[in-house]
Amino acid sequence: MAESTPLEESRSPRRAPDPRRRSERARRAILDAASELLGEVGYSKVTIEAIAARAGVGKQTIYRWWPSKASVVFDVFTALTGGTAGEPLPDTGDLADDLRTVLRATVDELNDPEMDRTTRAFTTELQNDTAFAEAVTERLVRPNMEAIKERLRAGRDAGQLAPGADLDIVAELLTGPLHHRWMLRTGPLTHAYADELVDTVLTGLAPRG
Amino acid sequence: MAESTPLEESRSPRRAPDPRRRSERARRAILDAASELLGEVGYSKVTIEAIAARAGVGKQTIYRWWPSKASVVFDVFTALTGGTAGEPLPDTGDLADDLRTVLRATVDELNDPEMDRTTRAFTTELQNDTAFAEAVTERLVRPNMEAIKERLRAGRDAGQLAPGADLDIVAELLTGPLHHRWMLRTGPLTHAYADELVDTVLTGLAPRG
Amino acid sequence: MAESTPLEESRSPRRAPDPRRRSERARRAILDAASELLGEVGYSKVTIEAIAARAGVGKQTIYRWWPSKASVVFDVFTALTGGTAGEPLPDTGDLADDLRTVLRATVDELNDPEMDRTTRAFTTELQNDTAFAEAVTERLVRPNMEAIKERLRAGRDAGQLAPGADLDIVAELLTGPLHHRWMLRTGPLTHAYADELVDTVLTGLAPRG
Amino acid sequence: MAESTPLEESRSPRRAPDPRRRSERARRAILDAASELLGEVGYSKVTIEAIAARAGVGKQTIYRWWPSKASVVFDVFTALTGGTAGEPLPDTGDLADDLRTVLRATVDELNDPEMDRTTRAFTTELQNDTAFAEAVTERLVRPNMEAIKERLRAGRDAGQLAPGADLDIVAELLTGPLHHRWMLRTGPLTHAYADELVDTVLTGLAPRG
DNA sequence: AAATAAGCGAGACGGTACGTCCTGTCTTATA
DNA sequence: TATAAGACAGGACGTACCGTCTCGCTTATTT
C-alpha cells in the first residue's frame, strides 16, 4: 500500500502544497515522534504540539501535510505494517492450516504493544470521523477481507468448505471473534485460541448425525 | 443494574458528597443534555461545559457526581438500555430460534441512531481508559456474554449443540461478527444477516459427508 | 481618574464578565508583569503570552478583562501617573512661574525611563487604533489641556496674558514643542529648555518697538 | 534625497546583492503594493507576506533589498514627497507670509489620507526602533528643521524677528503644535489654524505695554 | 555565442504568538 | 451544604507571519 498518500485529501479549501518540495527529513521525524509518543502517553494524550516539538518541526509543517492527528497515526500504522494490506494469504492446499497460520499471525500482531496501541488509536478515531473511517475501511479493512475471501474461495473449490458457504460470513466468523476479544479484552489472545476458532468455524457446532 | 452508581467511584481523594442531598432535577437535566449533545455533535465534540450549559447546571455539579465525560455517557447508556444487561435469554426450547431472536434485537438496537451513537462513544473511551474499560466489561459485556452462554448451555444439554462445544467460543462467534460489521461498517446490519449468522454458526462450514 | 475602568468597554459581542468576582491578585500581577516587560523589551516586543507567563496567569484572564495589549498598557500608565490627569495647575499668582513648574515636571516625567517607555507605547498604539486613540484623548489628553487652559484663563484675567489670546493655541504652544522634541529626539529635554519655552511663548518673537 | 538607498544598510552579515541586477519592475511593484495596503489595512496590519503576494514577488526579493517593513514604508514615503526634505523655504521678504505658506502646505499634506497614513506608520516605528528613528531624523526631520531655521535666520537678519531669538525654539514653536494637534487629533488642521499659529508665535502673548 | 552567475517567483521550513476553547479547581452568592 | 454561575491557571487548538532556505527559471554580465 502506498504509505504516504494522505488520507482525505480533498477535504479543505486550502491550496494544496507542492509534494515535490516536501522535506523527507521532516516527514520521517514527524512519523517517528508520533510513534514514540503513541507508545509513551497513548493516542488520546498525544498532541500535535508535542509531535511537532519532539520532531523539531513547526506545527504548520504537520498541518500542511496531514489534516488531523488521526491521519498522522494512519501513516505511522501503514509504515509499521509495511503495506501488507490485501496481500494474498498463503495457500499450502490445506485451508484449515493456512487459516490457523494467518490468525496466529494476527494474534501476534495484536499482542505487540506498539501495534496494539496504534490499532486502538485507529479504532477510536474510526468511531468519530466518518470520512476517516471510510478511508481506512477502503484501504485496509476491505483489502484484507478480500484476501481472506480469496483463500476461502480456493478452499471451497477444493472441496474443503461447504459449496454453498457465504464467504463474507465466513470471513467475518474468523476475524470478528478475534477482534471482539481484543477490543473488549474478554479473554486471552493466544495461538491456541486462534486454532480453536478456525476449527470451530470449519467444523460447525451442530451435533453430527 | 443500578443505573446511577458512578463508575470508578474511588478514583479521587476528594471527600465523597452526600448522595441524599443530590438534586434529582440536576441529574436528569445532565443526562438529557448529554444525550442530546451526543446526537448533535458526536462524542468527541461533546464537552463538559456544553453539557453544563445546556442542562442549566454548574460544572461543579457534574464533576461532583461523575469522574469523567465517559462515565456520564455510561449513565446515558444504561438509562437507554433500561438495565437489561445480564438478563436471561428467551428459552422456547428451540436454540436456533432463540438466538435469531436475540441477534435480531441486537441488530435493531445498533440500527437505532441514539444507541449507535452512545455505543460508539463507549467504544471510543474503552480504548483509551483502562479503568473505564474494566468497569464496562464487568458490568455490561461479561453479564451479557454469560447470559448467552447460559442459553447455549441449555441448548447443548438439550442436544441442539455439539456436546464438546466451547461455549465461550460459540458466544463470540455469535456476537463478534455482528460487532465487527457494525464497528467497521463493512456491510448492512439486517435481520437476514442475523439469521444467516446463527445458521452458519450452528451448521458449520465443513462439507457434510 | 478611575484607573481600572476598561477602555473600549462595549466593543465585542462577548458577554461581560462580572467585576465583583474579579481577582485583585491577578489584576495586580498582570499590570506588574506588563510594566516590567515594557521596560525590558519595549512595547512592540511585549506579548500577551509573556505577560501571562510572567504574571503566572492564564491568557484568558487577560483577554477577559482587557481587549488588547494597548489597553493593558493604558492601565499600567494610569497606575503610574496615579490618575493626575486633569488636576488643576498650581496657581501662585505668577503665570510664568507656574507654567515653568508644570513644564519642568513634564520634562522630568518624560526623562523617567519607565514613563518614557510607557508613553511611547501609547503613542505607537494611538496611531493604529482609532477607538483607542479617542479613549486616550478623551481621558488623558483633553483633561490635561483643559487644566492648562484654566490656568491660562486665570492668568489672562489677571492681566498676565494678552486679552485676546486664543487659549487653545497657547496651550499647544507650550506642550507641542516639548512633545515634538521628545518624540523625534531632536534635542535634549531639560529644565532650561522648559524655562526658555515658557519665556519665548509669553514674550513673543517680534522685535519690540 | 536619494529615494531608494535602503535604511540601515550595514545591519546584517549577508553579502550585499548587486544593485545593477536589481529588477526595477519588482521594486515598483513592491512600493505600490505597500502603499495600497497601507491605505487598506493600516501600517500595523500590513505584512511582508501580503506585500509580496500583492506585488507578485517572492518574499526574498523584499528581504534582499529592505531590512524591515518600516524601511519599505520609508521608501514609499520618500517616493510620495519626491525628496523635498531640506529644500529651502520660499523667501519673499515677508517672514510671516512665508511661514504661513509653509505651514499651510504642511497642513495640506497631513490632510491627505495617503500622506497621513504613511506618516503615522513612520511615527509608530520611530518609537520602537531606535536605529530607524535616527536614520529618519537625520534624513528627514533635521534637514527640514534646518531649512526652517535658515529662513528664520534671514528674517532675523532682516529685523523681522527679535535679535536674540533662539532659532531652534522658534522652529519647534512652529512645527510642534501642528504635529501635536495632528498626532493627538485634538483639533482641526486648517489653513486658518496655520495662520493663527504663525501670528501668535511671532506676536507673542504678553500684553503690550 | 556560450558559460556562468545572480536575481527572480514560489513556497516549504523551524519558529513565535495569536486569540479561542476546554479542562478541572476554586470562589462567590443564593436557597 | 448543595447548587448555579463563573473566574481562575493551564494547556492545546489551528492560523498567520516571521525571516531563512532551497528549488527551477530567466536574465545579465563575463569569457
Image: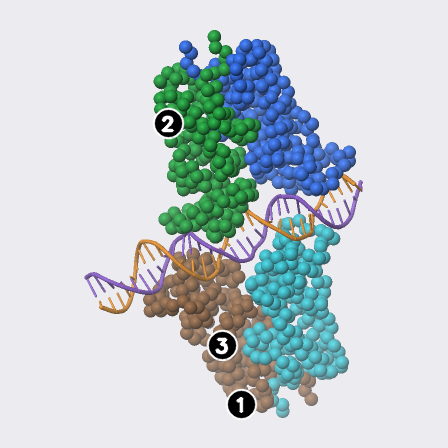
Chain colours: A green, B blue, C cyan, D brown, E purple, F orange
In this rendering, the label closer to the viewer, 3 or 2 = 2
The residue lying furthest to the top in this view is: A209
Q: Report, in whole angstroms, how far the alpha carbon at label 1 lies from the one at label 2.
A: 111 Å
Query: SS of the residue at dot 3?
Result: helix
A103 up-or-down from C30: above or below? above
Q: Chain of mark 1?
A: D
Q: Which mark is residue D158?
A: 1
| D74 relative to A87 in the view: left or right | right
Residue A73 versus residue F25: which sits nearer the camera?
Answer: A73
Q: Report, in whole angstroms, how far the alpha carbon at label 3 lies from the one at label 2.
A: 84 Å
Q: Quadrant of the C terminus of chain D?
A: bottom right
x and y percentages locating residue C8 in the rendered image: 65, 58
- Is circle 3 on the same chain as circle 2? no
In this rendering, the label closer to the viewer, 1 or 2 = 2
- The amino acid at mark 1 is Ala
Question: Looking at the image, do the residues carrying marks 1 and 3 touch, with CB atoms under 8 Å apart?
Answer: no
- The amino acid at mark 3 is Glu
Could you tell me which residue is drawn at 39 percent across and 15 percent down?
A163
Could you tell me which residue is drawn at 52 percent across and 79 percent down?
D145
Q: Chain of mark 2?
A: A
- The amino acid at mark 2 is Pro
What residue sits right under mark 2 in the picture? Answer: A90
Q: Which mark is residue D138?
A: 3
